[in-house]
Amino acid sequence: MRGFIAIGPLRMKHLGWGHAIGAVALALVFGSATMITSSPAQAATVWLCKPGLKSNPCAVSMGSTALYADRTTRTDIPTSPKSPRVDCFYVYPTVSNQKTGNANLNIDPEEVAVAQAQASRFQAKCKIYAPMYRQLTRSSSILHDGTPTTPADQELPYTDVKAAWKEYLTKFNKGRGVILIGHSQGTVNLTRLVKEEIDPSSTVRRKLVSAMLIGGGVLVPTGKDVGGSFKNIPACRATTQTHCVIAYNSYLTTPPQNGQFGITLKSGMRILCVNPNSLSAGATGPALPYLPTSRLAPVLPAAGFAAPSTQWVSLPGMYSTRCKSNATHTWLQVSDIGPAGDPRPHLTQTLGPAWGMHMTDISLNLGSLVSLAGKQSAAWKP
């Protein structure tokens, strides 16, 4: 019998985007929430993360403590490079607790927490730019976390993300390569951005190191790596490949029929799965989870570990991943490979089997994603 301590979510809930983007998907995701579509006024970009900001959640310490199954630990204190050769453009998932249909552009603790947890470790490989956007709030989502006090405008999020992207290209890019990183609602908006602004333009595509579009619904024709959501940007299948996409939806168990992620209603298409821990199709690779220490601190003493002094905890040798598919779903299968009696805290499908590992899609694979960003950055040519 394995030792088992369940880890709950960061104190936030992410919006699910499992089905094909479109009217059907919006109905499934937003349920009874009132939705409107407008031509919204553009707002001035507010940067959650940007080089030089006084308060920058993407610039926290990268110090980490690795926890091993034999209760030994190892501390690592890496430093950020002064001049990484590429940038990262990060769009966060649904975290806003505001009660309106769309969030405003105020930086709340939820955005700070998720940027630290998902994006900040990429500072080892890139300069991080992360815009605030008027996202659809938790109240507007299928989670039904309260009733929104205003209708949700589905165009507002993309309007802000697109405007921030254009500002980034004009003011900050200066010919550098860029890695896109998104999760859940952030991935929905980045997928549209790639489809409309990057994929059709060879000039802009050359800037793209890779697109990490996680917890969303990138489409590919069955058995192929390109030709669905994007016509010119294929799946990444080698660590030195650039101008490509990494996408997946993770599950600890086989997705049930009502699984929210990895399924499309579009005939002849599948949801893309690229294993970030081993890019070759069908391969299995070891995952390296990184989680904020504050998230694990309450359960570590019971597991026999002293509270780490570092910002991060990693869990090496605990999980492996592999892309799998069945008649309905395509997903990243997460397998527990730790030894019997492993006392370390375990990740769980917090919201149930239908949601899978959506809450920890990035944290579960963060070590490999950051490493991959470095290898692709080194291979990228202007």
Image: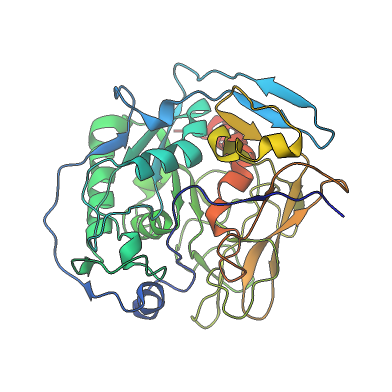
Task: Name which quarter of the figure residue 87 lies in.
Answer: top left
Left or right, 63 with respect to 342, comes to: left
Q: Horizontal and vertical percent for residue 291?
A: 58, 39
Q: Horizontal and vertical percent for residue 104?
A: 21, 50
Q: Report the quarter where the C terminus lies.
A: top left
Left or right, 354 with respect to 170, comes to: right
Q: Horizontal and vertical percent for residue 73?
A: 75, 26
Total tally of numbered discs in the picture = 0
Q: Residue at x 30, y 42 (%)?
A: 108
Q: Horizontal and vertical percent for residue 374?
A: 57, 32
| View extreme (left): residue | 41
Q: Is residue 240 visible?
A: no
Q: Nearer the viewer, residue 212 or 154?
A: 154
Vertical side of 287 occupied by 173: above or below: above
Left or right, 34 with respect to 187, comes to: left
Q: Residue at x 20, y 66 (%)?
A: 149
Q: Report the quarter where the N terminus lies.
A: bottom right
The colour style of the image is rainbow
Q: Nearer the viewer, residue 343 or 173?
A: 343
Vertical side of 5 occupied by 226: above or below: below
Left or right, 333 with respect to 166, comes to: right
Q: Nearer the viewer, residue 352 or 372?
A: 352
Q: Residue at x 70, y 70 (%)?
A: 254
Q: Is residue 265 visible?
A: yes
Task: Name which quarter of the figure residue 353 lies in.
Answer: bottom right
Q: Nearer the viewer, residue 160 or 178?
A: 160
